[in-house]
Image (tube, rainbow, N blue to C red):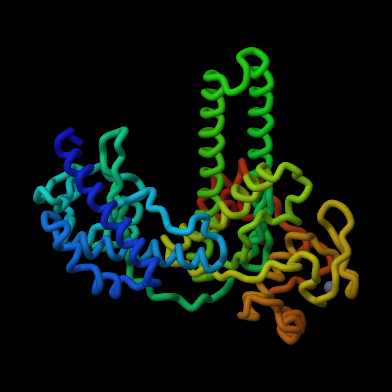
Amino acid sequence: MPRRAFRIFVELEGMYRNIVEQLVLYAVNNGITKFTRLRAEKYRELRSLYPQLPSHYAYTACQDAAERAHSFLRMRKMGRARKPYPEVRSVSIWLDDHLWRAEGLTSISITTHKGRLRVSIELNKHFLRYVNRGWRLATEAKVKLDRRERRLTLYLTFKKEVSEYRPKGYITVDVNEDAEAVLIDGIVYLLETGLSRVTLGYYYRRKRVQEKYDGVYGPGSRPERKIFKRLGSNERALKREIRWKLATLIVREAAKRQAAIVLERLGKEPAKNMIERIKDPQLRYRIFQAAFKGIQKAIEEKAREYGVPVIYVDPRNTSRVCPIHGAEIIYGKDRHGVCSKGGEMWHRDVAACYNLLLRALGGDGGSAPSHMRAFVAVDGGPVPLGPTAAHEPIRISRSLWARWRSLRGREEAQGGKEVK
Ligand SMILES: [Zn+2]
């Protein structure tokens, strides 16, 4: 932006920040978490304190502050607030329909204390993707100042009327550190991601760089930091690409079948039993973020884009119990085990996928009720009873699935001899 125009936004942000700071303090002191109450008690005062500011900023600042107060009070209640009072650190200016307006696709205008300002905008791919899918812009927006580049970042909200479909089926996803097991139409696909290997690979590369450079330049030198930065951004980009491609593949399959996606409900702490062999807690956290949290987030966002519902179920013991008999599966090596009651073979990820499905069918997210288990098995329903073949997942390497647009596409590509 031109320097002069940007200056106005800096002033605006300053005023807005002051208002939000005051409001948050007041809200927390008085236990207010509702925007309407905060507005009722402070609006008049704000108007007389900032007469030059368009009145709708008093509204949006109240909304902003009420949300901050609400989350702070909740954190304090849980004993997780770090400070006795909330800190207003990063600020984005909240706008409502009176404060901004799109002027075609090339610029917007924003109302400020110096009148209406027109700002030219640059759309990104993400924006166009949503518009193409039939999403419409909501009236609220947020603006953040980027002082270094002297530009504004505009955060928009899209909305869409969705007819929430009653799922006709379920696609269950069991996430592991290096692969994703996906149950579609009675077949478990094991889509390899290699995410923990990516994390570990970069970790060791960083270590090698550190050892080499520390010896020459001493710790924390500039060339070392430069290499770290590059490695970090490469790592992030690669992981992001893996996650998005995988999420897109799964969500597309769900949308095609009008199915819901079933995911494990993950806790906040790194899933210890899944990656406990990693001793370094930071490394364990990073693997968890990349392989578990990150994949789920990507699936959630893609699912929203396509209007596919996501269901969460209790992940406890999903691979330890036989989906047919409810008895313990005794595992040997190679992720293979034998049901202690029926004696049939199970692959760990296949058992997990079917148990997630049972829990989703059970509806309560807890363990599937026993009648459901019996029903499914007797009915010849979703659980395969064949002694061997169906218990083995179809393993697909990343180099393969990353090039597919759908799991069906490969049947045609390979002459229909696969899968069925
Ligand atoms: Zn069994």
Residue 326 in the image: state x and y as whole percent: 81, 76
Quadrant for residue 369, please give it: bottom right
Quarter in which the C terminus is drawn: bottom right
Residue 129 in the image: state x and y as whole percent: 35, 52
Quadrant for residue 214, please give it: top right
| Count of number-bearing discs | 0
Quadrant for residue 217, please give it: top right
Residue 324 in the image: state x and y as whole percent: 79, 76
Residue 120 in the image: state x and y as whole percent: 18, 42
Quarter in which the N terminus is drawn: top left
Which residue is at a point 73% across and 60% down the rendered structure image?
Answer: 349
Residue 232 can be seen in this image: yes
Which residue is at a point 56% across and 45% down the rendered structure image?
Answer: 242
Question: Is 1 situated above or below 354?
Answer: above
The residue most toward the top is 216
The one of 359 and 74 positioned closer to us in this rendering: 74
The one of 167 and 77 positioned closer to us in this rendering: 77
Which residue is at a point 39% across and 66% down the rendered structure image?
Answer: 28
The one of 85 and 88 positioned closer to us in this rendering: 85
**Left or right of 406: which side holds 100?**
left
